[in-house]
Amino acid sequence: MIDVLIIGGGNAALCAALMAREAGASVMLLEASPREWRGGNSQHTRNLRCMHDAPQDVLVDAYPEEEYWQDLLKVTGGNTNEELARLVIRESSSCRDWMRQHGVHFQPPLSGALHVARTNAFFMGGGKALVNAYYRSAEQLGVQIRYNTPVEDLEIQDGRFIAALVPEREVDGTRLPAERIEAKSCVLAAGGFESNREWLREAWGQNERGEYPSDNFLIRGTRFNKGTLLKRMIDLGADSIGDPTQAHMVAIDARAPLYDGGICTRIDCVSLGVVVNKEGERFYDEGEDFWPKRYAIWGRLVAQQPGQVGYSIIDSKAVGNFMPPVFPGTKADSLEELADQLNLPRETFTRTLQDYNQACRPGTFNHTELDDCITEGVTPAKTHWARPIDTPPFYGYALRPGVTFTYLGLKTDDTAAVHFDEQRSDNLFVAGEMMAGNVLGKGYTAGVGMSIGTAFGRIAGRNAASYSMGK
Ligand SMILES: Cc1cc2nc3c(=O)[nH]c(=O)nc-3n(C[C@H](O)[C@H](O)[C@H](O)COP(=O)(O)OP(=O)(O)OC[C@H]3O[C@@H](n4cnc5c(N)ncnc54)[C@H](O)[C@@H]3O)c2cc1C
């Protein structure tokens, strides 16, 4: 019998597989996707947030434990577990040497990368290169890797893992039989439920306008994170944590594909202009804070608008001050023409822009600081970088809510064990998005997803190996 079975094929799963194998256990990893789509959301990532007390290769200055913790406390509004959060933070200071041993390389951030040179270590070649390096290392160490192997159920007895069940399926025209895979221990690292549209619909429900908002959400990452095992585990009595509507959500280009659009679908000019809804009205302070601290609230803000759509509007003064999106925006020489092209009600739109333009007070524009360019007498106010939108050509980008990952997960502790009725399982562990809600009750700070997955993937792999090998 295999010592350690790993379910999932992203960062958390790979960290667990490598640690278990290094400890001497025999390891099998089951990835739902075909080989070419392996790596889940992790393949789309760019960096991880790292604590450090002094400059460390690509990381400048210092980012001490206390500051990291305070950042997490702020973004989650206290909806976090301090013990587990601090464990993640400490692990983030020491994991990079181990990552390098498995072929991950780091680089300083490129300009325009949300100003995180101090706090975040960037993967050279991005998450795709990280995932490829880990798979290569796992293969070399003798981890058995099975693609096209979605687990649909688990056999659990008295809180202990017995076997994983894989349904009959067709792969490249060949019918593969159903399988029952036993192991001495198991690590669940199969992501959140962001790609399960029915579950999103159930969680978000219907709004006061009779709409099902989630029907208009786009999924920024993998189509394979359907939450099948998360749901099964909750049904089987595992303790869960988090709110199913809490997720990392970004406002992204409405032209992005339904899945796997990745980071290049982001629209980063919100703070340089205004955002209106499909009725042509503004609805939130676009200049509330620096964009890196605010980009993750705009997905939810757009989700609350009619039709779950927003339009980021700028004029030619803004061009060059933000990372240009992959696709060009809608361009027009007048605001009336822009309204027509974007299918927005011309009168309301031009009145909104006029009201905003008249409310802009003269100041010294500086996009690198919280400047004194503000509005007065308009609601909502724009509290920084408010300049009239008056210099053609004008540009508009339609925005949709883009779900990065969901936070509902399985409850765990510092051993990464799954809990049933507050009792930890001996041989069933959890890592990554499937338990991120223990640390992230809501909110987000860039790079913490990979810090959580790396820390808990490594702990889960180590503990699963110890159990299986009787240590
Ligand atoms: C566009 C984008 C950019 C991001 N950028 C960053 C960043 O720069 N830094 C950061 O920290 N975080 C970032 N994140 C978040 C980050 O991707 C996640 O926090 C992290 O990758 C989660 O790792 P994971 O291993 O838990 O999940 P995933 O990497 O999603 O892996 C889950 C795996 O489980 C597999 N799976 C699912 N169901 C089953 C099943 N039933 N049976 C078998 N296998 C199954 C999937 O195929 C997948 O391989 C980003 C996410 C996206 C979408």
Image: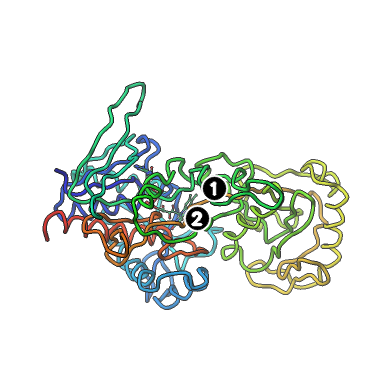
Give the residue at x 40% y 55%.
433
- CB under 8 Å between discs 2 and 1: yes
- Foreground tag (2 vs 1): 1
From the top left corner, tell me how far across and down residue 255 is, in percent: 63, 41
Name the side, left or right, on which 457 lies relative to 333.
left
Task: Specify whether tag 2 is near ligand 1 (CB below 8 Å).
Answer: no
Extreme-bottom residue of the structure:
66
- Report the coloring of the rendering: rainbow
Q: Which residue is mark 1?
A: 202
Name the side, left or right, on which 318 lies relative to 121.
right
Amino acid, disc 2: Pro
Q: Quadrant of the C terminus?
A: bottom left
- Marks 2 and 1, the one that precedes in the sequence: 1
Task: Specify whether tag 1 is near ligand 1 (CB below 8 Å).
Answer: no
Q: Is residue 50 above or below residue 324?
A: below
Extreme-top residue of the structure:
173
From the top left corner, tell me how far across and down residue 348 is, in percent: 85, 52
- The answer for how far apart the CA atoms under marks 2 and 1 are is 9 Å
Give the residue at x 83% y 57%.
352
Q: Which residue is mark 2?
A: 244
Circle 1 Cα neighbour tier, 10 Å, few/some/many (<14 / 14–19 / ≥20): few
Dot 1: element: helix
Dot 2: element: loop
Q: Is residue 451 above or below residue 30?
A: below
Instruction: Using the rendered view, name the quadrant where residue 50 is placed.
Output: bottom left
Name the side, left or right, on which 94 lies relative to 397.
left
From the top left corner, tell me how far across and down residue 461 is, in percent: 24, 56
Q: Is residue 351 above or below residue 216?
A: below
Amino acid, disc 1: Glu
Q: Quadrant of the N terminus?
A: top left
- For the residue pair 427 and 339, the one nearer the viewer reads as 427
